[in-house]
Image (cartoon, coloured by chain):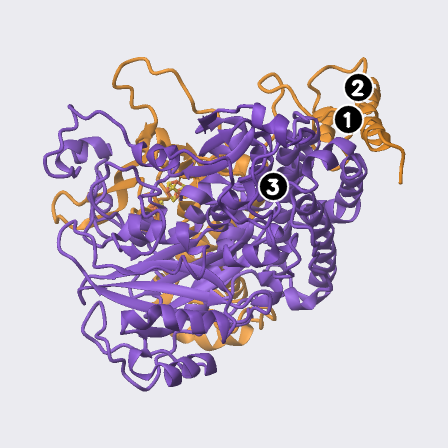
Chain colours: A orange, B purple
Amino acid sequence: MAIIGSGILTGLGVTLRHFVETYIEDFKYMGKKAGVQPRMIRRQSPKAKGIVTIEYPMEKMPVPENFRYIPFLVKDDKTNEDRCTSCGICAKVCPPQCIWIARTEDPVTKRPVPAPKDFFIDSTICMNCGYCAEFCPFDAIKMNTDYEIAYYPETENDMRLVYDKNRLTMNESFHWNIHPSVKAAELEAKAADEAKAKAAAEAAAKKAAADAAKKVALAAAPVVPDAPVASVAPTPAAGGAAMAARAAAAARAAAAAKK
Amino acid sequence: MSEVTATPAKPAAKPAAPAAHGAAKPVAAAKMTPEMSAIAAKFGGAVEAAQYEGLLVTDHSKFIEIATYVRDVLKYNQLTNNTATDYIKDGVIEVVNQFTRVPQGGAPLTLKLRVPRPSGHDKTQPVPSLCPLYPGAEFQERETYDMYGVVFEGNPDLRRILMWEGFNGWPLRKDWKEAYYEGDTKPFESRWPGGDHKLAEERVPWEDNVNYPPGFDPFAFKPHPDGDIYDSMLAPSDGTVSIDNGHGVAPTIVEGLNASEMAELKTDEIIVNMGPQHPSTHGVLRMVVKLDGEKVTDLKLALGYLHRNHEKIGERNTWLHNIPYTDRLDYITGIYNEWGYVLGVERMMGLKTTDRVEYLRVITGELTRLASHFWAIGFLLNDLGAFFTPALYFITERDLIIDLLEAVTGSRMMCNYMRFGGVSRDFTSAQWAMARELAFERLPRTIDELDHFLTENEILKARSIGTGYMSADRCIAHSLTGPCLRAAGIGYDVRRADPYGYYDRFDFDIPVLYNGDVYDRYLVRVQEMRESLKIIQQALNQAETQSKVGDIQGGKKAYNHRVPAGQCYARVETPKGELGYYLVSDGNQNPYKYHIRSCSYINLNSMKEMAVGQKVADSVVILGSLDIVLGEVDR
Ligand code: SF4
Ligand code: SF4
């Protein structure tokens, strides 16, 4: 049997080591400006030793890209149009039911128009689950990574935590900024969509003239090796090779989106 | 694919005798297992096949006899789960009991009882209580009483447990409506397409939506809700401890004094309230202890301060909505809670998962087990008086784990990671590298350090060896599960006893120790952390060669799941013990019944026996060794 007290002494040795390591770590970064990123990131990484705390709010850890807080709506930078079509899926999947969507109606026909008239998210109810962003078929709602939304109420009926469409809507560039990994895919999908629309328009325009050229065009179109089998490529009309390639790109994007 | 061990809800050919709930369709009767046939053969007229699963005991007077047979002859020695379901269209409330063999495991045996559904807020007619046979039934039956108004004849303390005493009505009955009630099931109509935000308070003024007992005036109300607790404890005791908890029936003795000195020493009996706001109760839990000197002679728990009627919310939700809610049960082990739930739904829907999904589930699940054990040991040491030095060292390690989970899932604790048939995201290569670094380098080192730091510490040993002892038999009878049961010499772990996921592909041990005290519970947790690491290391290695990156959704990405009518009891081994989900579907988008067999809650059932006869300071340590999380206790 060990000597009485040796267990405690071993334990104290561990605390002593932690204590000393704290200073060794600090010496390594001495002379460098406080709050520099490398020190902070090391302190919060599996390599951390000694002191591991950072001094929030003076120092802030960058949040990971997937981090989710309150959702926001994305609008197109160029056309200024909402991506949202007010399909209502996000309102249905929202577990605490904190999304309210008013659909736009055509003033004349009274038929629904695919755009939201208003869009509310009650952030006091939102449980930050991320379902809305996950299930939106149009990539129109995304999760913000800003977690500092607390404020002092200024009036008795201060409702700033209920976000309306105005305050929810953000630029595409903001979205790509905080979610860089999706930018390329979204741009590609967008280009593919545009190509598809253009292809359809061109196809329609040239349809009349196409009959004679059709045989030639089909013969000229190269077989695209990686085009998915189930692609719904628009009929390549007189466009020829370039056209077929674009159609294949569209099909690829569609297949990727389906995944 | 996860192994299907619970009886899947497959409609059998024979229509059931009892009428269906929901629409008046005939409902499939349960498949008979050999054990069920044995009961049916012995108690012919008293039982019949229940709908979906298990046996329905039609003759209530035979119920105790049948339960005794189940316990003593069929050797189902643990009552796993007790709850009820309100089949409002049939006009019955069905009490469900599930029994397991410990430590052999296997699929549980289900016994059901039906009582007519009383009108209004009346209680039901009494059904026999299982407490004399299975002491672990006490808290569970009290909860069923609290939620459904089912009266259990023979329960020693049939009071409300999660709701307060002045509460009117039985919240899980189908006709009970909560404050700010908006509809029976989500999604609510008002959200789309004509959504106009209103605060819940504006929509439903609370005066219109709150029920009071007849003659109750909320403004004249003077609370004395705890009269019952104190009254039952006030009876003077003769200085002996009346519970046989394995220490024997011992008079209170102060060590070092002989009998005549003892007679001179006068101690007063006092009742002390600990909590609900107390650092040593791990949350909003109140312990009422009766003390003779420093010795605990009686102990009662007041629960429900964090109650939010999780199960009612679960019935309003769609199947998918419930996944993020399960994170909020035991918020230290969010991922594991989700796993239990999706496992149940996958079994009911017959969904298949991919290899990648199963590996990711094991990796993230075992990481949460590590995180939870770090937390548990840290706070156990806090309770022992090592104020926060060990706890903070371990919280550092846990923080690294949840940093990784945050990067993968998007949230540190409320991960919302599992999906039916899949998970929400795969690891990126940087995250994978971090997982490897944690599993192969950082965490093995820190667990060794933890061991070195604490295990031989004389103060820890002096305080915890022999404290909170409970014998193996009593542990089983009290429905205790998890590390506490394994510290009493029972190698029962759902990962082996009722396997799920890919656990059969890994080489790991279930650590078992035999002293049944706080020190062994601590040691079992340390050992389990090493085993978890082994599992994670193997899973990381296997996943690299045997699964395809990005293959994370088995089924297609759907949000409006319809689960075939049926029922399922799915269970997983969380760090705290056996977490079970009892789910009933009537074929709709929303669960008809959503019950959680909460291990934290049921483990608390044994608290009294462990603490009586010990010093009051030790009762705090015992609670710490049970490792409860109030989010799961109170639901
Ligand atoms: S945000 Fe997406 S899911 Fe929600 S209504 Fe708009 S398009 Fe539909
Ligand atoms: S994050 Fe979840 S709770 Fe919040 S708005 Fe989206 S779906 Fe609703």
Distance from disc 2 to disc 1, alpha carbons, whole Å, reads 9 Å
Q: Is mark 1 within 8 Å of ligand 2?
A: no
- Mark 2 and 3 residues: CB-CB less than 8 Å, in contact? no
How much space separates mark 3 and mark 1, taking CA atoms?
A: 28 Å
Q: Does the CB distance between marks 2 and 1 fall below 8 Å?
A: yes
Residue ID for mark 3: B625
Residue B553 in percent (x, y) is at: 52, 62
At numbered mark 2, what does the secondary structure look like: helix, strand or loop?
Answer: helix
Q: Could you tell me which secondary element the residue under label 1 belongs to?
A: loop
Residue beneath disc 1 = A50
Residue visible at 36% across and 40% down in the picture: B307
Q: Is residue A246 visible?
A: no
Chain containing the residue with disc 2: A
Question: Residue B318, position in %: x, y?
Answer: 33, 55
Of residue B515 and residue A219, the one placed in the foreground of this image is: B515
Of labels 3 and 1, the one closer to you: 3
Amino acid type assigned to the residue bearing label 1 in the image: Gly
Residue A29 falls left or right of residue B473: right
Q: Chain of mark 3?
A: B
